[in-house]
Amino acid sequence: MEWTPEAIKAEIDYRQAALHEDARRVQEYYRNGGQPRSWWHRMTHRHEPEVPNGQQAA
């Protein structure tokens, strides 16, 4: 796969949108009275965005 400037920008935008969504979800969690989780819980219960399946998506 060749990384064109457009593809790089699209990847950056995609990742930035995922980070913003994650931050929004965390803020909502704490606003609704959620308690901080341990580092172990955060590492083992990650909420990853849906990612296309490699070469099959191309």
Image (tube, rainbow, N blue to C red):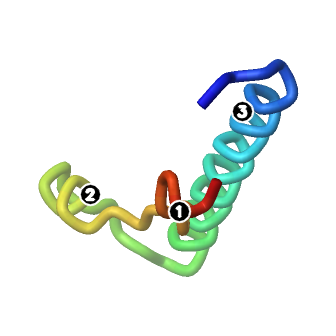
Q: Residue at x 42, y 74 (%)?
A: 34
Q: Earlier in the sequence, mark 1 or mark 3?
A: 3
Q: Quadrant of residue 52?
A: bottom right
Front-most of 23 and 6? 6
Gap in Å between the C-alphas at discs 2 and 3?
24 Å
Q: Which amino acid type is marked by label 2?
A: Arg
Drawn side of residue 19 relative to residue 38, left or right: right
| Residue 17, image x, y percentages | 73, 50
Gap in Å between the C-alphas at discs 1 and 2?
30 Å
Q: Residue at x 74, y 26 (%)?
A: 8
How many residues crowd around disc 2 within 10 Å: few (fewer than 14), some, or many (20 or more)? few
Quadrant showing the C terminus: bottom right
Q: Nearer the viewer, mark 1 or mark 3?
A: 1
Front-most of 43 and 37? 43
Q: Earlier in the sequence, mark 1 or mark 2?
A: 2
Q: Quadrant of residue 44?
A: bottom left
Find disc 3 in the rendering and name its residue: 12
Question: Judging from the image, what secondary structure is the residue with disc 3 in?
Answer: helix
Q: Which amino acid type is marked by label 3?
A: Ile
Quadrant showing the N terminus: top right
The numbered dot on residue 56 is 1
Counting the numbered discs, the total is 3
Q: Residue at x 78, y 21 (%)?
A: 4
Residue that sits furthest to the left in the current view: 40
Residue that sits furthest to the right in the current view: 6
Find disc 2 in the rendering and name its residue: 42
